[in-house]
Amino acid sequence: MTTSPDPGLAARPLGTPLVARTVALDPPVSSDSPATLLSLLPALDDPREVSSWVRRGEGIVGWGRALELTTTGPHRFAEAQEWWRRVVSTAVVRDEVGVPGTGPVAFGSVSYAAESPAGATLIVPEVVVGCRDGRWWLTTIGTDASVPAPAAPSPQAAPTEPEGVTFADGALSSAEWAGRVSQAVERITAGEIDKVVLARDLRVQADKAVDPRWLLQRLAERYDTTWVFAVDGLVGATPEMLVRLEKGLVTSRVLAGTIRRTGDDGHDLALAGSLARSSKDLEEHEYAVRSVADALRPHCSSMNVPESPFVLHLSNVMHLATDVAGVLGDRTTSLALAASLHPSAAVCGTPTEVADRVIAELEDMDRGRYAGPVGWMDAAGDGEWGIALRCGAYEADDPAALRLFAGCGIVAGSDPESEVAESDAKLVPMRDALTGA
């Protein structure tokens, strides 16, 4: 890659205009499987070459890199958006399908903190395959000199299960992290802050390279209500849609307040009722909803914010959830909307500046792109951006090593041991995917 005059910005030179062609595909024979799209991904030596955004069998997957950008610092969102604007303004596009996600598409993920070296990355794959409402398509992307030939993809050989997977403490042990939760509660009780979200990490080492396709397919099969994503080596299954922009409609799903499921339907129903009545969890949820609504309101001509949350049932946990919706009132892109929402109270706390400072003081780690926006954007600026939760990041230059992350919202009524248990529950999806459990 070459470096631009801005030291925080690095990208492959644009050179000749981007060329993108989208053609319709016949549905694969097994198109009713939640992992069908993912089964089309080829085996690649570098896990960072795989891209995914799939939920309930629909979405887009991609591989290779026609163009890429990395930018760091406080202006990373704006610089990424400007780069994409320049790319699509000169692109030559032939789109025979014409739905959101066709034509040139950029997958992206953004660091939680401005000072993180992980920065913001946009990846334009060489090949993208998509499925929406029963319609399938293939997009090939390149330059005048190099555009992959359109060819219907076929299911690839199944990925192999990771071998010799071991887990170790990250920056803090469980006991140490519980101590940090206690410190956070003391600061909340003292009136310094209303809420703070504390995260912890877990280190993973395998005997050989971990195929991201294995992780993606296991996550899709077990957590089909989540968005199963992969962007530049960040892999996970997020239940939280930070923002979706589609033809002027803005939507955001807010999750805050969590309880672990037992597997007993009757008991889980009772737990769901207790979650819906929990003053601690309702308070945490209210902070998160308010922060999202306040951030979106300047960009919307009208908004709908439900008064009460509902309980979202996932495979291993339940969350208090609220769907916020609005009508776009300006020409803001989905990435710019994501920037206006980040960091929300669901991943940071309230007030934001104080919570952010407490996170930096207590976590003892760089979150990287965990808890930052992750998703995709098309040439029109429409797209979907989730929050990178329930995820792991491949370590640089070692496809056999990852860091897993989980976080919990801490308020005045938080109990440290309960928060450790909640964080353990949030690590389960990635741990099980890695071990084949």
Image (cartoon, rainbow, N blue to C red):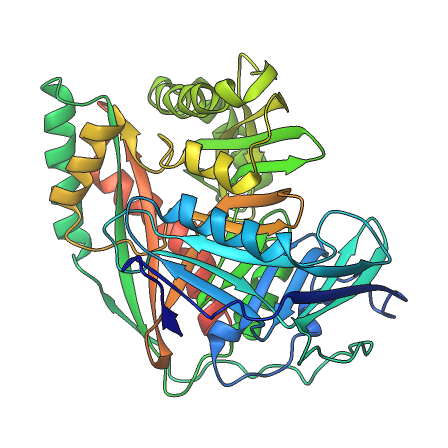
Can you give x and y, in whole percent of width and height, for residue 436 in the image?
51, 72
Can you give x and y, in whole percent of width and height, for residue 247 in the image?
72, 34
Q: Residue at x 39, y 36 (%)?
A: 342
Q: In this view, does 87 lie above or below 157?
A: above
Q: Residue at x 31, y 55 (%)?
A: 72
**In this rendering, would 221 be left or right of 309?**
right
Q: Depth check: 386 or 177 in front?
A: 386
In the picture as drawn, the residue positioned furthest to the right comes out as 26
Can you give x and y, in whole percent of width and height, for residue 308 in the image?
53, 15
Q: Depth check: 175 or 29 in front?
A: 29
**In this rendering, would 249 be left or right of 213?**
right
Q: Depth check: 429 or 104 in front?
A: 104
Quarter of image, res 311 = top right
**In this rendering, would 188 be left or right of 252?**
left
State the quadrant of the N terminus: bottom left
Q: Which residue is drawn at 40% across and 23% down?
A: 291
Q: Residue at x 90, y 67 (%)?
A: 26
Q: In this view, does 165 lie above or below 317?
A: below
Can you give x and y, in whole percent of width and height, for residue 176 in the image?
12, 51
